[in-house]
Amino acid sequence: MAQVKALIPSRTPRRKRFSLGKALIHAVLALVGFLCIMPMLLVISTSFSDDLIVAEHGLSLLPQGFTTYTYGFILGNPNQLLRSYVLTLVVTSVGTAGGILVSALIGYALAHKGFKLRGVFVFIVVFTMLFNGGMVPTYLIVRGTLGLYNNILALILPTMIIPWYIMMFRSHFSSLPHEIMESAKIDGAGEWRMFFQIAFPLSRPWLATIGLMYVLKYWNEWIPAMMYIEDPALFPLQYLLQQIVRNAQFLRNVRDAMTTQVRIPGLSLQMAMVVIAAGPAMFVFMFLQRYFVRGLTAGAVKG
């Protein structure tokens, strides 16, 4: 064995040569990455800064006159903020799960060549992508016909069906190998079993991509709360933060009229709200980023 090893030439690790081109590429990418995260750094820095110093010297990547007064102002009623957080998490979770399931089912039906009314329903979905009834008919249906005034379902149902996502699922299910479905049919599988055991598991990149879109839409939505909710216990996070900004603006106007020296945050309050509201959505994107990229490139032409 020793003689055999002696005959094998030893391989010394080869040093990688310095490449000016690769160094420039990495430098450009690092610069682009920094420019992408710089707005968020400015937001975080301003949320911990003193408003008077920011108004005098402008924005900075480092906090100016470091203070946590703004966060203390927002957390003045922590129970209400925590309740809105939990409510928003529930609405986002239920709405995303329901939206993905319903959109996938409709897309699967529209991709099925044996569905006789497929053309009619595709026309209906595409038509609603181009034209919709508007805010007033939606308000009359949700509040009047469905009676969802001051109801958590008013925050979930109007956003659950999105025609664009249905067409994305239809395009994906149409691209699945037809032989797999035929084999399942020969083995005696029905449509429900083929959907939940074959088509649905093969759609993980699309599920992650559309699921992330649903999460962002539900998490950032505040218009349904403005239209259908008056009970403060049902205020979602975004609408609650908007109410805090309005109250702060009102208090600043009263302070200016009365010429008092009460400290009420301004720009730093808005930046702190962005930090509080954006946190969970950023973590969701980090976990789903791999599938999100795969879902966006799934329909690309391979050369």
Image (cartoon, rainbow, N blue to C red):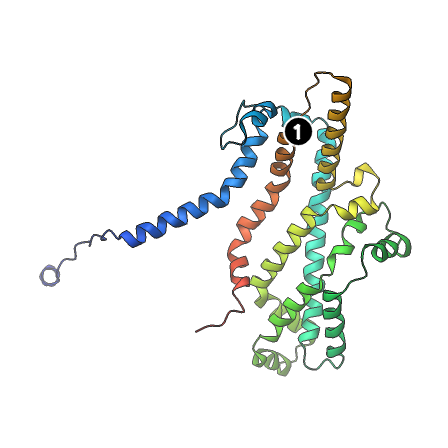
Please tell me whether mark 1 sits on a helix, a strand or a loop.
loop
Q: Which image quarter: residue 252?
A: top right
Estimate the x, y position of residue 249 in percent, counting from the top left. 73, 30
Q: Is residue 279 left or right of residue 125?
A: left
Visible residue check, residue 301: yes
The answer to whether 48 is drawn above or below residue 92 in the figure is above
Q: Is residue 299 left or right of residue 138?
A: left
Q: Residue at x 9, y 63 (%)?
A: 7
Label 1 neighbourhood size at 10 Å, few (<14), some (14-19), many (20+)?
A: some
Q: Is residue 69 left or right of residue 225?
A: left
Q: Residue at x 64, y 40 (%)?
A: 277
At label 1, which amino acid type do we have? Gly
Please name whichever residue, 261 or 144, is drawn nearer the observer in this view of the structure. Answer: 261
Which residue is the site of mark 1?
Answer: 266
Q: Which image quarter: residue 226?
A: top right
Q: Is residue 225 left or right of residue 219?
A: right
Q: Residue at x 40, y 46 (%)?
A: 30
Which quarter shows the N terminus?
A: bottom left
Q: Residue at x 70, y 16 (%)?
A: 261
Estimate the x, y position of residue 216 in percent, counting from the top left. 64, 50
Estimate the x, y position of residue 61 in percent, counting from the top left. 49, 33
Visible residue check, residue 196: no
Which quarter shows the C terminus?
A: bottom left
Estimate the x, y position of residue 84 in percent, counting from the top left. 73, 38
